[in-house]
Amino acid sequence: MRPWGMTMWRRRIGSAVGAVIVLALLAAPGEAAGTAASFNPDPLDFGNVQSGSALGYVTATNESSSARTFRDTVINLGAGFTTDNNLAATTGRDQACYFNGPSDVVQVQVAPGGTCRLYYRFTPGSDGSFSAQPLIQVQDPLSSASEVDPIVLRASSYTPDPATRGAFTLSPASLAFGTVPVGQTKSLSTTLTNTSDGNVQVHTAYPAGSQYRTDPTSTCTQTGGPAVVLVPDATCTIVVTFTPVLDGASNISTSISLTPASGAPGTTVPYESNTRLVSKSLPLRGTGVGAKFSLSPRSLSFGTVSTYGYKSLPLTVKNTSTGPLEFGASFGSVASFQVILPETQSPTNCLWGETVGSGFPGDPQVVEPRSQVIASGATCVISVLFHPFAAGELSATIPIRSYGASGAVGGWQDTSGSTVTGGASVKATGTAAEPTFTLSKSSLAFGDVTVTDVKRLEVTMKNTSTIPLQFGSDVASDYTFRPVPSDAANSCMSEELVPPQDWDDPPFGTLVRQYRSVPAGGSCVLTFGFFTYELGTASFSLPVQVYRAPGAGGFMDSGAPLATRQIPATGTGVAPTLQFSPSTLAFGKRTVSSAKSVVVTIKNTSPVPLQLGSSQPTDGGTYRAVLPTGDTGSNCMRGTYVPDPNPFLPPHLVYEYRIVGASQSCSMSFVYYPSALGETSAQIPITYYRSYQPSSTFSDAGFSLGSTSIKATGTAVAPTFSFSPSKVAFGDVTVGGTRTVEVTVKNTSDAYLAFDTTYSTQGSPYRFVMPQDGPQGASCVYETYQPPQFPGDPGLTETHYRTVAPDATCVLTFALSPTATGAAPDATFPVQVYEAYNLPGSYSTSVGQQRASGALKATGSGVASTFTLTPATLAYRTVSIGSSKTLTTVIKNTSKSPAAYDIAITNSAYRVAFATDHDPADCISRTGSQTTYVTVAAGASCDLRIEFLPSTLGSANASFTVNAYAPYALPGFYSENHGPDVIGSKVLKLTAKGR
């Protein structure tokens, strides 16, 4: 069965949802400014408003070729006139040009040739004439172009005598129709005379369901149309018809009222005002007489039914007339009560619904009622359906009509052209209750959720009503709080991506939601997710929609909406959590300008996969990040050089980040490279990104979630080093000699260092021995000299510094060359310590900043040169005059320094016997006239030969001084000069006799 007149329809699944592109032109060719709209009436004349206020409207017509909107500018509105568009469009008015929506003014787009209404109200503040010329803005909704058109408003006001305001008479003052057969019509009229002192129009109103109507032949007013303008003392006729549809008396009163009018007298125009000046009742009496039948029961009580639910009750109709009848019924005064047309013929039914088509393909089929011919004394049943659409107590009067039979008893006839022969009614009552259901949770507290993660909570929806329901939520799928549809067996709603069907569909298809039909007493689950994208607390009111299920079982499109319930939802987006091992980067003490690295392991303790990186610079600064260029198996990030598309430009560095899953780890290395002494600290930034790719792979950075930091501390200290020996003790050094001492400098720090000394040798017996042209062993420094390359070029002397690694050494050589006997003045050799950049053991001509210095104390004494003479006395004995004798004494250098020797002979009987072959064994040698002196090394000897040449008789004993000199030549070599400084002396005795 289906209700009589219920429309059968089908909803299309997967209707496209997407952007609509609208192409519109402001004005078609030939349209000029000021021609986009027309207004009627213009002027709008409110006439004479005697009390209260009058409402009128101007119809705006879009005369352009594209859509337009119309809006009062409230300019030049004038006293007494106000706009009256502040009510929503659901107030029953014809289409307003604009109205106030829930949050803003809604303007209606009027299609070309379409119309809308601009409502105005006139409320006089005093007697007199009033006018205004408001401006109307006509706007193209797709552009900023618009035009402004004026209209004219007119009104007047005066206060007539209360005794004569709106007075009128009716003659006759009541209408008695007598007895009228059911289905037939009788007309009567009354004359209305305007006894007031103003122009008026007549209104008539009948109670709902009345069997009385105003006939179109009335001259006062037309049904639903305009009314005549009556001047004082003018008359018009109201013709009333009585068409009974039920047996029995029908006694009612119709309301006759007057409203002010300003139109031309005697013209029939639309009502100009809603202000009622006066109202009177016109009693109407009549009795309907028709064929006899009875109804059982006389009232139908349906009790309580859920909205959109169904309940039917039978109504027995008995033919109590003397001949066969057919019966029909219509809807009551409330659409929730309907008469059911059975889908099959049955001898017990009064009615049957036959499906009829037009015969043209594609035309819809309709259900037409058919009535059974019921014999005298027989009964049939009419089923009445209570199908409420809104909650509350409902009632209706359902008229039942009888028709003259047009066929054999038991046959089915179409009563559309049959004559009504009688009527009765049955009252139907029922209470419509909102469908009941329960939610297992009244609110959803998602708590802390890592940003970009999702947490799901379930709400069980139980249908506690008597009809099948559907449950769903229309929150968009890209909201922070949103439903999570699924095809699970207990899910309330599902979602399917329907591919594009035509060009108008979105390019990726349409998401179509369907809802499970939940029977009475059944339940389903709505799953909601908190999808976090921002830090902080978020809240939302999640709507749950309840629908009347259009079918039973499975997922389907939503039925009629019944109710909406709100579920407050809260959640907090929190940053991902990381665990550092170690928890801080404690570099400790480190030599300034040296580097120390620490590896930190970062564990992803959040539930989402992350990519981790640091913006800490890799070059420059005290704390630096180490950027690997490959996959070390655990590094969080890496740098890859990618060729530039421009072949003339160098490759550029691209950063990639490892995807670290929940509870997985990666590592980062950081270097402490202090450039100044003292303690420093820094917060090393660690940035985390959300990635949706497989873990352990490298990729570009994903969605940035924020950053945290790890604290780094370190103390830069000056370089440390040691000397061995710690004091340069030269001891006794022969005056004129030189002793060197090597000092081993050890780098006891953790940095690469270079060492040098700037000790000045001028005026001091001490000096630093600088190796020339190349290092001597592990020399700390050496010098090279490049001769002049061109005139005026002074040449180039360069110092080369050895790079000394931690725990390695180099050598500094110092010398003492005393020029006098006795303790030499104490001296301090300064040692400078520099940063070194080269490889350990190599030399560089440049070093970094000086970071430390040291000092070596030097001590030593100058002592006279010592030597022995063997023999110390030369005994020549007796030598004949005119002859000679040579004796030799061996000079042994017993000092620690080389020396050259000479003898001062003051007796002509003696002379040095020079060697002529430069034999190193000879202390003195002569070649021609050139005398030379051999340099005798420490511990070495030379021969000094003295010749005795007596020239007189007798004894020739003598003593001569042998002097030691600081030599010029190397040991074993001769020099033309033995040096100016005497560094030691001995006396050589000679005994001899001449004969």
Image (cartoon, rainbow, N blue to C red):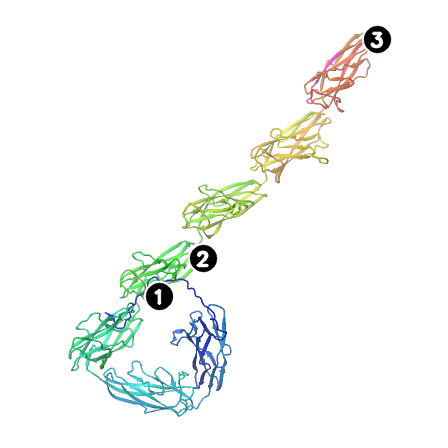
User: Label 1: which residue?
Assistant: 564
Q: Distance between the residues labelled 1 and 2?
A: 28 Å
Q: Label 1 crowding class (10 Å Cα cut-off): few <14, some 14-19, many 20+? A: some
- Relative depth, front residue between 149 and 433: 149
Task: List the residue tagged with mark 2.
Answer: 536
Let me know if residue 479 is in the magenta part.
Answer: no
Other residues around mark 2 within 10 Å, as few (<14) / some (14–19) / many (≥20): some
Q: In this view, does 949 lie to the left or right of 445?
A: right
> Could you tell me which residue is drawn at 33 percent across and 67 percent down?
561
- Single out the mark in the foreground, 1 or 2: 1
The secondary structure that most of the magenta stretch takes on is strand
Q: Position of residue 354 (x, y in %)?
A: 23, 71
Q: Give the range drawn in magenta.
A: 887-896
Q: Is residue 665 above or below residue 82?
A: above
Q: Nearer the viewer, mark 3 or mark 2?
A: 2
Q: What residue type is labelled 3?
A: Leu
Which residue type carries mark 2?
A: Gly
First in residue order: circle 3 vs circle 2: 2
Residue designated by label 3: 953
Residue 417, picture quadrant: bottom left
